[in-house]
Amino acid sequence: MRKITNSDKGIYILEIKANHPFYLSSKIFKNREMPSGYYYYVGSAQKNLYSRVSRHIKKKKKVHWHIDQITTLNITDVKNVYLFMDQGKNFECELVKDLVKRTDMDYAIDNFGNSDSKQCKSHLLYSKKRIPHNHFSFLYHSIVRLIPSSIEISD
């Protein structure tokens, strides 16, 4: 199996389970209640892919990106990370649109995580039920699945 390094680039999907409804904390999304269920965040790392994914999995971190508002909550857990190795930034929004079209997911909230690109409505998708990993594998044959417990993370 290929080892993921910081010289790698790619697009990733974080599968995040929210055990209870929650509110977002930023000024932009303030007082927006988010339901329990599964959130799928599509992001890009055009360098340092391993560090980016490892950071997203950590609970304790400074809130920098929109997704940090969700991943730092005690009621959420990153369950899986799906990687599209060597994909450029343009694939990010293409993937979001394709996921909405080909799965039961829908946009969780507009303008979430896409401040650097207006090509798509949002980078955060929502599904009441988990999308099985074999469904992702069927749709995207080159996808790599990481289970967070298999990634070494230092706090």
Image (spheres, grey):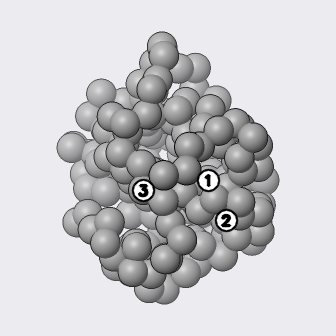
Mark 2–mark 3 Cα distance, whole angstroms, equals 17 Å
Q: Mark 3: which amino acid?
A: Arg
10 Å neighbourhood of mark 2: few (<14), some, or many (≥20)? many
Which of the two residues, 142 or 136, is positioned nearer the viewer here?
Answer: 142
Which type of secondary structure does the marked residue at label 1 adopt? Answer: strand
Identify residue for label 2.
Answer: 92
Looking at the picture, does residue 5 appear above or below residue 103? above
- Work out whether residue 82 can be spotted: no
Q: Mark 1: which amino acid?
A: Gly
**In front of the other: label 3 or label 1?**
3
- Mark 2 touching mark 1, by CB under 8 A? yes
**In front of the other: label 2 or label 3?**
3
10 Å neighbourhood of mark 3: few (<14), some, or many (≥20)? some
Which type of secondary structure does the marked residue at label 2 adopt? Answer: helix
Q: Residue at x 58, y 78 (%)?
A: 97
Mark 3–mark 1 Cα distance, whole angstroms, equals 15 Å
Horizontal and vertical percent position of residue 23: 38, 40
Task: Give the residue at the far bottom of this rendering.
Answer: 101
Q: Which residue is drawn at 48% across and 13% down?
A: 155
Identify residue for label 3.
Answer: 145
- Mark 2 or 3, nearer chain start: 2
Q: Is residue 117 left or right of residue 66?
A: right
- Work out whether residue 154 can be spotted: yes
Which of the two residues, 115 or 82, is positioned nearer the viewer here?
Answer: 82
- Mark 3 or 1, nearer chain start: 1
Q: Which mark is residue 43?
A: 1
Q: Which residue is drawn at 67% across and 65% down?
A: 92
Quadrant of the rendered image containing residue 4:
top right
Quadrant of the rendered image containing residue 57:
top left
Q: How many marks?
A: 3
Which of the two residues, 72 or 26, is positioned nearer the viewer here?
Answer: 72
